[in-house]
Image: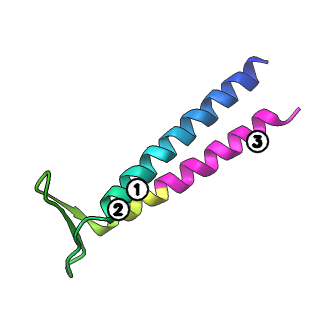
Amino acid sequence: MIRRALLWLASAFALGLAAASALIWNARRALPFNAEGRYFDPDNAAVIHQQSVTGYAMVGIVLALVGVGLGWLARRP
C-alpha cells in the first residue's frame, strides 16, 4: 500500500517536472533564432544556445516516460 502511494507520488512528480520542462522548451523555441545557432531573449537580454533548447525537450521526454512507467508500476497488482 505504501509502495503504491510512493510510486504514484513519484509518477506525479516526474510528470510535473516533464510539464515544466515542456513549457520552458515551448517558450524558448519561440524566441528569435540567428544563423549562429543562438536564440535571443529580449526580455532578459540573454543568449540561449540551440543545444540547451533541445536539451529541455529531451529532458521533458525522458521525465514523461519515467512518470508513465512509474504510474504503470503503481497500477500493477
Please state if 8 lies on the left or on the right of 33 as rendered: right
Q: Please tell me which residue is depicted at 51% across the width and 39% down the height of the picture.
A: 16
* 45 displayed left or right of 18: left
Q: Which residue is farthest top?
A: 2
Name the main secondary structure of what is drawn in magenta: helix
Give percent across and percent down for residue 7: 69, 30
Name the residue located 33 percent from the left edge and 56 percent from the top edge. Answer: 27
Q: Write the residue at 71% across / 39% down.
A: 71
Mark carried by residue 56 = 1
**Separation of residues labelled 2 and 3 (CA atoms):** 29 Å
Q: CB under 8 Å between callouts 1 and 3? A: no
The residues tagged by marks 1 and 3 sit, at their Cα atoms, a distance apart of 24 Å
> Which residue is at a point 45% across and 59% down the rendered structure image?
57
Distance CA(mark 1)–CA(mark 2) = 5 Å
- On screen, residue 43 versus residue 67, left or right, reads left
Q: Quarter-wise, where is residue 15 in the image?
A: top right
Q: Residue furthest right?
A: 77
* Kind of element beneath mark 1: helix
> Residue 64, how many percent across, how many down?
58, 49
CB contact under 8 Å: marks 1 and 2: yes
Q: Which residue is mark 2?
A: 53
Q: What are the residue bounds of the magenta stretch?
A: 59-77
The amino acid marked with disc number 3 is Trp
Q: Amino acid at mark 1?
A: Tyr
- Does residue 24 sit above or below 71 in this rendering? below
Q: Indicate the position of residue 24 as horizontal and vertical percent values.
A: 36, 51
- Element type where label 2 sits in the image: helix
Residue 72 got which mark? 3
